[in-house]
Image (spheres, rainbow, N blue to C red):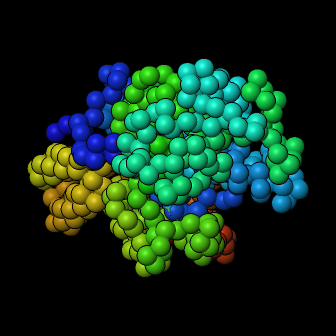
Amino acid sequence: MALRFFNTMSRRKEDFVPLEPGHVRMYTCGPTVYNFAHIGNFRTYMFEDLLRRYLKYKGYKVTHVMNLTDIDDKTIKGSREKNISLNEYTATYKKAFFDDLDTLNMERAEHYPEATTHIPEMVALVKKLIDKGFAYEQGGSYYFKIAAFPQYGRLSHMKLDELKTGARVASDEYEKEQVSDFALWKGWDEADGDVYWDTEIGRGRPGWHIECSAMSMKYLGETFDIHTGGVDNMFPHHENEIAQSEAANGKTFVNYWMHSEHLQVEGRRMAKSLGNFYTLRDIMAKGYNPLAVRYLLISTHYRMQMNFSFDGLEASRNGLERYLDFLSNLEDVASTVDGGEADGFIAGAKTGFENALDDDLNISGALGVVFDFIRDINRLKAENRLSKAEAGRVLDIMNRFDSVLGFRKKQAGLDADIEAKIAARIAARKAKNFAESDRIRDELLAMGIILEDTPTGTKWKRKL
Ligand code: AMP
Ligand code: ZN
């Protein structure tokens, strides 16, 4: 089956064909670093992580760019309220963002361009739009003239009849009812304090939308394959990116637009402005393992709304435990006699997993296949019909699946430390120093490591 994605532009599933065979170029709108990201934001980033991991699984080279919005209305407001420089203010949240990515076992993109270090590219783009008659100046700011771009509104299917020509909106975020000429460049005013750049188009700072047009095209070219974001980005942000980029270059900006639905809390979007949000840190402080959060966020299809609840998180924790225990228990299989059935299950699981994800990343289908496979292999194992060699092949395919799911997190340095402590405990027991052996067990337990003494040796796992 061919890989297919639902394209927001056409509102249907389309076969995915990248511009350059074997190489996918994708852009994902990154965080506005004015606060800690909440798990709603991470639902969108998790969908993008699944997308990039599956493209790699399919053998594509992926060039993935995620920007960091470190200059916009919200970051300026935040830094001024705290009375610190913009850079100092955003540095805290940039670091927290990357820490959280690692904690959630998300892969790094190839590039994380920051808006503040790409001002010349943005100014060049605004100048191009001025030269071509798509932009005009008003009170030191520059606006995009949507009347000059009749295709405006195609992505979000807007009707432009009611459009009041000449109406302008200066803020970065606004509602559909306010559709009008939007700011490309905002001339300096007092509220900006010392945040400004002196450029050929005057003193000021970029609008939010021009940032993503300039940075995506710099790293991916004037036309690239995939652009993603949460559904709230469709209007005005992505609509404005298309207008700016296509007006400037006269070319299609992006071939596939993909948008993920929101994480909700009691029927409303999880959002900082509503105060109904949890950060990853909030949830970990309640004792949950971040990989259970990963499992939860990834496991609902990206185009379906998803409600956050602690019951759901608990169910994810249980699913994760079953998955990790399965991997760990495969290592105990010692039989040298092939049962002869495992390879059939392996082939079936591989086909099922790929068919599901090829169909617009049907993750629930893919997870269903994985858990059926786990059940089937567990049965073979319980009935002594699985050899060590067959278990090895099961492990190989599970590792392939896990390159997409990312549920098993390798922590090389930490793991080696744990192994060393376990070796010390075994030595203590051999020497009949049971006090020392118990002390090490307790020390490991305090680190969240559970030991299990089995006939084949001591095994360990992380408490979930
Ligand atoms: P922001 O930092 O507000 O620019 O948002 C970063 C990303 O998170 C954007 O792609 C948003 O669409 C996305 N996002 C914001 N809130 C949610 C939510 N409740 N569920 C899923 N994605 C969200
Ligand atoms: Zn963006």
Q: Which residue is more in the foreground, 107 or 233?
A: 233
Quarter location, residue 14: top left
Residue 228 appears in the rendering: yes
Question: How many labels sit on residues?
Answer: 0
Residue found at x 55% / y 21%: 132
Residue 412 position, x and y percent, is 57, 47
Name the image quarter holding the N terminus: top left
In depth, the one of 61 and 345 nearer the eye is: 61
Q: Residue at x 69, y 33 (%)?
A: 137
Where's residue 51, x and y in %? 39, 44
Depicted 8 relative to depicted 120: above or below: below
Q: In the depicted view, which residue is nearer to us: 331 or 202? A: 202
Q: On screen, 91 above or below 317?
A: above
Q: Is residue 98 above or below residue 227?
A: below
* Closer-to-camera residue (384/116): 116
Q: Is residue 311 left or right of residue 31?
A: left
The structure residue drawn at horizontal position 46% and vertical position 33%, both measured from the top left corner, is: 149
| Image x and y of residue 20, in percent | 35, 21
Query: At 30% across and 55% down in the image, what residue appears?
Result: 363
* Residue 415 in sight here: no
> Residue 54: image x %, image y %?
35, 42
**Left or right of residue 228, residue 333 in this image:** left
Quadrant housing residue 140: top right
